[in-house]
Amino acid sequence: MADIEPKLNIDGVEYLLKDLTEEAKAQIQSLQFVEAEIGRLNALVAVAGTARLAYQSALKELLPNQTH
């Protein structure tokens, strides 16, 4: 079986990871960290949005009925 070397595709251009500088590899790690953080924060926003809807619903049940 042939060795498959890890590659990175940026703007349609493939780069072999082994050919990148240490600085470029560090930027990749930083980018991966930021992408993971964005995913984590998006999940927190989703949880907060769900909680907000639940609190709004609970509040509506506690408010007196208004007749117009």
Image (spheres, rainbow, N blue to C red):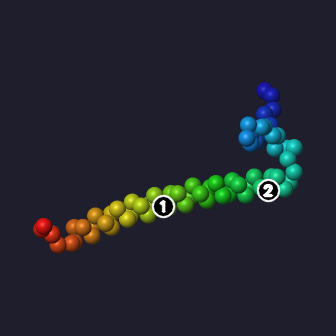
* Residue at x-position 73% and y-position 41%: 11
Vertical relation: 21 (above or below) 44: above
Q: CA distance from mark 2 to mark 1?
A: 28 Å
**Image quadrant assignment for residue 22:** bottom right
SS type, badge 1: helix
- Compared with 38, 65 (above or below) is below
10 Å crowding of disc 2: few (<14), some (14-19), many (20+)? few
Towards the viewer: 66 or 16: 66
Q: Residues within 10 Å of mark 1 (few under 14, many from 20)?
A: few
The answer to whether marks 2 and 1 mark residues whose Cβ atoms lie closer than 8 Å is no
Residue 42 at what x, y percent from top left?
Answer: 52, 57
Residue 16 position, x and y percent, is 82, 40
**Residue 45's mark?**
1
Residue at mark 2: 26
Q: Residue 40's quadrant in the figure?
A: bottom right
Amino acid of disc 2: Ala
**Residue 23 located left or right of residue 64:** right
* Disc number for residue 53: none
- Residue shown at 34% from the left, 62% from the top: 53
| Residue 54 locus on image (x, y percent) | 33, 63
Q: Residue at x 69, y 53 (%)?
A: 32
Q: Secondary structure at mark 2?
A: helix
In the visual, does 37 lie left or right of 15? left
Q: Is residue 50 left or right of residue 30?
A: left
Q: Tag count in the figure?
A: 2
Q: Residue at x 22, y 71 (%)?
A: 62
- Toward the front, the furthest residue is 68
Give the mark nearest the N terminus, 2 or 1.
2
Residue 8 is situated, as x and y percent measured from the top left of the image, at 76, 42
Name the amino acid, label 1: Val
